[in-house]
Amino acid sequence: MTTVVARFEDRARLHPDAPAVICGAERLTYAELDSRAGRVAAGLRAHSVRTESRVGLCLERTADLPVALLGIAKSGAAYVALDPQQPHSRLALLAEDAGAECVVVEPGAPAGWAMPALTVKELSGAEDTNPPLGAGPDTGSHPPLAAGPANALYVVHTSGSTGRPKAVVMDHGPTARLMRWTERRYRLDGFVLQYFPITSDVCGYEFLSTWWAGGCAVMAEESDRFDVSALAELVRQHAVDTLLLPGAVLEELARIARRRPEHLASVRQFVTTGDRLTVSDHLRAVCAQPEDSPATNAAGASAVVLDNQWGSTEVNVVTALRLSGPPGDWPGTPSIGSPVSGGKIHVLDERLRRVPINVPGDLYVGGGQLARGYLGRPDLTAASFLPDPFADRPGGRMYRTGDRGRWRPDGTLEFLGRADFQIKIHGYRVEPGEIEGALRDHPAVGRAAVTARASDSGVRLTAYAAPPPGEDAPDSADLLDFLRARLPAHMVPRACVVLDRLPSTSTGKVDRNALPEPEAETADGPAPPRDETDRRIVTVWQDVLGRADIGTRDNFFDLGGHSLLVPQVVLRVNREFGVSLSLRVLFRSQTVRALADEVKAARARAEATEALEARPDTAAQAGPDTTPAQGAPDGPR
């Protein structure tokens, strides 16, 4: 069986000068990417990395990311996906949990890893990493490929109900099988947007499926991922013809395209994954084409297609539904389609018996595309990957997804939601138990619970905490700060309610139905601004959110804000106050008061720097600075 690495190297030999990656101003041909990745692979081999080794991949969204991803695969190892935007303490924990031999990091990245931390430049050695165009792949620098279909390709952590993330191991074999199905279903030999973060298994799918077909991955830089206008301009600039996006992002793009249709005029394939798809009038309008358009077929129907994929990290893509023909006829809430890529779907009752058509049941996935299991967690693997009684051959397994669904009479699958406490936020699977575990790590917390409730702005997470018996109650703001330092932004609750004790059921479990709603603003109305900084930020929020009733303690996301509006707020605040806050600040400081404090701190730092620069004689006479180095204002990267 051909692996994704062997397929890429074939493409590099056949079309060395074809574009493989575009990221900002940097472009890499297949020859250049092959050569750079080969040097990274050789460097890893020199550090004793072998088949079945695991290597942490913790890089920003630059061209070095696909270079390192492919280089790790060429070395025979599996990459461990690590997002540098997350707290460093969590990243170090995940790398150690995965048993990484080393981790590939940015220059100047924080220390504190339990294994060697190496940059792409260090791994590549002193050789020229930019061969001339047309030079062809530098096969002499490549180590022999040892990984086969049964070897690990990547490790991606998902949220764990026990409070500890689960490391999913995916092998080369299932991934190659998915690539072959993808090649049959889509045309990816053009320009394909690469949107998802490295911690999503979809990120690897975007890169590898594009290279499998000989196409070019157009990477959205980190700031572009949260700025839909910039994303639309990226699509227009590079004539991107395939988009794979969460449904919410695609909807925002469709809104822009109705006003400026030229931005998505090149797109012929829209693919959604990560969230339940809702087909809006905006999306229908974007997918509809004029009769004289080259994207209209002989029958007069739109040749633009919309695919709705469903799957999970443990099973890759399992089902897909293609919406084609006149978009006006598309259903508002489509099904998730039928099995693909050799997958098999079982809708079963609690005794693992098949249920009839139209009867809800638990969804199980069988077939050859399943992950190996959870790294170092045989108990969890055995509980989730079960013997498949419906398998065609002995030894078959099926994965318990935790989702509910039912077969429709037309043979497609209807998704009905989760069967457990697990939820999905912005396409990420979140186990409340993991957040509860992090909260219990606080010394002033005895018991903890986390709930998810639907709101106008999406799913709202609320944390509840109670102190140990006889101890003082902790401060709710301190607890949220504690979580922000340990969890990615999408897992930090919007509010934290501190109680003397958590309500319990007769069996001693937390009675989640008895947990109170977080307190809203007082009857006197929204909390007023404390000063001029608060007032100016309130004005920015009012303009961006289109509402007047904003208090300084209101949460931006509870007011209807979402990640796609974050760039607008941060850009306007930076212009208003002459500061340079990053997008992550608003995810961390989600109220007007907290954001105002960030602005004041940034201005104070800028003023101190200006004062120091204005006194060069003082700086020259002061001698060496013996003050310990402080972290960057926005936290470790």
Image (tube, grey):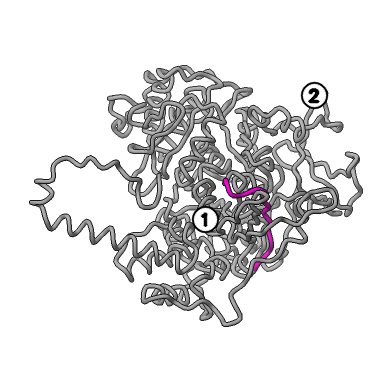
Q: Main secondary structure of the magenta part?
A: strand
Q: Of label 1 and label 2, which has the lower sequence position?
A: 2
Q: x%, y% of residue 34?
A: 41, 30
User: Label 1 crowding class (10 Å Cα cut-off): few <14, some 14-19, many 20+?
Assistant: few
Residue kind at label 2, given as amino acid type: Gly
Please name the residue shown 51% across and 73% down the image: 545
Q: Magenta residues, as a range?
A: 443-455
Residue 314 sits above or below residue 48 on the image: below
- Residue 624: mark: none
Please name the residue shown 56% across and 21% down the image: 52
Q: x%, y% of residue 286?
A: 57, 65
Q: Quadrant of the N terminus?
A: top right
User: Based on the displayed image, in which of its 4 quarters is residue 46 positioned?
Assistant: top left
Residue kind at label 1, given as amino acid type: Asp
**For discs 1 and 2, the disc positioned in front in the rendered view:** 1
Please name the residue shown 66% across and 61% down the image: 299
User: Based on the displayed image, in which of its 4 quarters is residue 22 positioned?
Assistant: top left
Q: Badge 1 is on which residue?
A: 478
Q: Is residue 314 left or right of residue 103?
A: right
Q: What is the CA distance from the residue labelled 1 to the residue labelled 2?
A: 50 Å
Q: x%, y% of residue 460?
A: 63, 61
Say what secondary structure mark 1 lies in. helix
Q: Badge 2 is on which residue?
A: 395
- Using the image as rendered, state which of residue 128 and residue 389 is in the foreground: 389
Residue 51 sits above or below residue 450 on the image: above
Please name the residue shown 29% across and 66% down the image: 578
User: Label 2 crowding class (10 Å Cα cut-off): few <14, some 14-19, many 20+?
Assistant: few
Q: x%, y% of residue 524?
A: 57, 82
Q: Is residue 95 left or right of residue 472?
A: left
Q: Quadrant of the C terminus?
A: top left
Q: Is residue 513 left or right of residue 625?
A: right
